Image: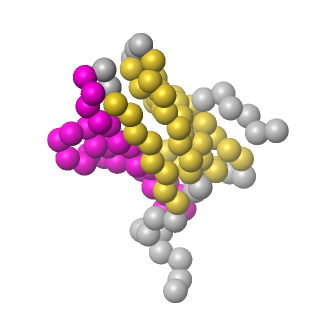
Amino acid sequence: MSDNPNFPIATAAVNWFDSSNNLHIRVYSSDGYTITERCMDGNGWTSGFSMPGSDVSATTWTASDGAHIRVYATFEDTTTEWCFDPGTGWNKGQYTAP
């Protein structure tokens, strides 16, 4: 089978409960070129942020200001960090590979 960029080749997922005990799920899937975020916040799945990259991993935690998400992607032969923080949205992080 030849490479088809429409098929996901890597997936990561995170979830958390907010202060009202509502479940939130994020799924990050890569087609080998772009990572797309799908969001479930109780009203069906929606599309979220997209970022360049192939392999993907993710983590999240909650603090008093809400959920913080970190996505790590392989891009241009290095690992790139993408950060979501309440009030600021998505930004490229400062992670550097050794």
Q: Which residue is drawn at 72% across and 52% down?
A: 77
Q: Which residue is drawn at 53% across and 77% down?
A: 3
Disc tally is: 0
The range drawn in magenta is: 20-47
In the image, residue 84 lies at what x, y percent? 47, 29
Reply above or below: 85 against 37: above
Q: Quadrant of residue 26?
A: top left
Task: Examine the residues drawn in magenta and state their main secondary structure.
Answer: strand
Q: Quadrant of the C terminus?
A: top right
Residue 53 colored in magenta in the image: no
Residue in front for this viewpoint, 28 or 3: 28
Q: Is residue 78 left or right of residue 63?
A: right
In the image, residue 85 lies at what x, y percent? 46, 23
Q: Is residue 49 left or right of residue 20?
A: right
Q: Residue at x 71, y 47 (%)?
A: 78
In the image, residue 2 lies at what x, y percent? 53, 83
**Is residue 49 visible from the viewing direction of this image?**
no
**Colour scheme in use:** secondary structure
Residue most extreme to the right: 98
Residue most extreme to the top: 64
Reply above or below: 51 against 66: below
Reply above or below: 42 against 64: below
Q: Which residue is drawn at 52% across and 65% down?
A: 9
Residue in front for this viewpoint, 9 or 59: 59
Residue most extreme to the bottom: 1
**Is residue 30 visible from the viewing direction of this image?**
yes
Residue most extreme to the front: 21
Residue 37 colored in magenta in the image: yes
In the image, residue 22 lies at what x, y percent? 26, 31
